[in-house]
Image: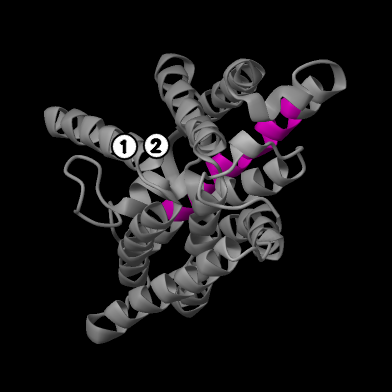
Amino acid sequence: MLRARIATAVLLLGAFLFALFGLGREPFAVLVAVVVFVAGHEWAGLTRLRGIARWGYASALATLYGALAWAWIAGQPASWLYGIACVFWVAVVPAWIGLGVRERANVALRWTGPVVIVPAAVAMVELHPGPLLAALALPWVADTAAYFAGRAWGRRKLAPSVSPGKTLEGALAGLAAVVAYAMICPAWLPRLSPVSSGAGLAALAGAALLLGVLSIYGDLFESAVKRQAGAKDSGTLLPGHGGVLDRIDSATSTLPLAALMFQLLPTRTHDRWPSRPDP
């Protein structure tokens, strides 16, 4: 199992980096549509949809994503979409997890699927490869630090009813790691040069901390949805890893806010996709 997990991770990383830096904007957007379809199919399964209804749900999410991504490519801002997602992750999800995600919530979960999956997918298309890689690496750093710190020093459970393996000590280590990670990002990402010193660097640390917290909620929320569905993984597509949702759970909660944050920074010509004209 460990060998399959490592092999799958290496293949996924290689394919992702090739797609990110080797494909133009439109081909990359089409690839993201495939991810949305698969993630939507898995989400529908977790909410007890079966047969043609499950396939229809996945198709509807992919179509919605395609329309919104095309609107952004045509020059329409997606800030409102990210705003809806941020309200959901900041205000709704913590309360929902606290109350408990029960099987009777399946209808509500079907309606939240578009909010979970689609804004993050549009953000993947909007963000330039550099900022996108930086944003996706943040939950990877948090998860890695939390895993090793939790194994070494974890004593107190973070959310035992949702994800028994997560500890408070691991979560705190993950948050500390993402702040440290954010401090080195301006050195290799020119887009962050305006916040590379002084008050800007403090703001960057605060933004990384907030994104780190949201990455935890993204992970916990998907765990809660899987638990109420009686499923260990969201799917079986990725050997050793489960489904697509198991790999992007933290990204669904962090990418919309990351896209909003990058919109606040000055735009540079080399930060855009080459095929998109300046406004």
Residue farthest along the right direction in this orientation: 199
Quarter-of-image position of residue 181: top right
Residue labelled with disc 2: 21
Circle 1 Cα neighbour tier, 10 Å, few/some/many (<14 / 14–19 / ≥20): few
Mark 2 residue type: Phe
Mark 1 residue type: Phe
Circle 2 Cα neighbour tier, 10 Å, few/some/many (<14 / 14–19 / ≥20): few
Q: Main secondary structure of the magenta part?
A: helix
Quarter-of-image position of residue 182: top right
* Left or right of 114 in this view: 58: left
194 versus 211 height, above or below: above
Tally the marks: 2
Q: Nearer the viewer, residue 105 or 263?
A: 263
Residue labelled with disc 1: 18
Q: Residue at horizontal 64%, vertical 63%?
A: 75
Q: Where are the magenta residues, as a range?
A: 204-223
Q: Is residue 269 visible?
A: yes
Image quadrant in which the N terminus is located = top left
Q: Is residue 212 visible?
A: no
Q: In terms of secondary structure, where does tag 2 sit?
A: helix
In the rendered image, residue 76, in percent from the top left (x then y), is placed at 66, 66
Q: Nearer the viewer, residue 235 or 32?
A: 32
Q: Residue at horizontal 43%, vertical 73%?
A: 61
168 versus 64 height, above or below: above
Task: Report if residue 197 lies within the magenta region.
Answer: no
Q: Nearer the viewer, residue 137 or 190?
A: 190
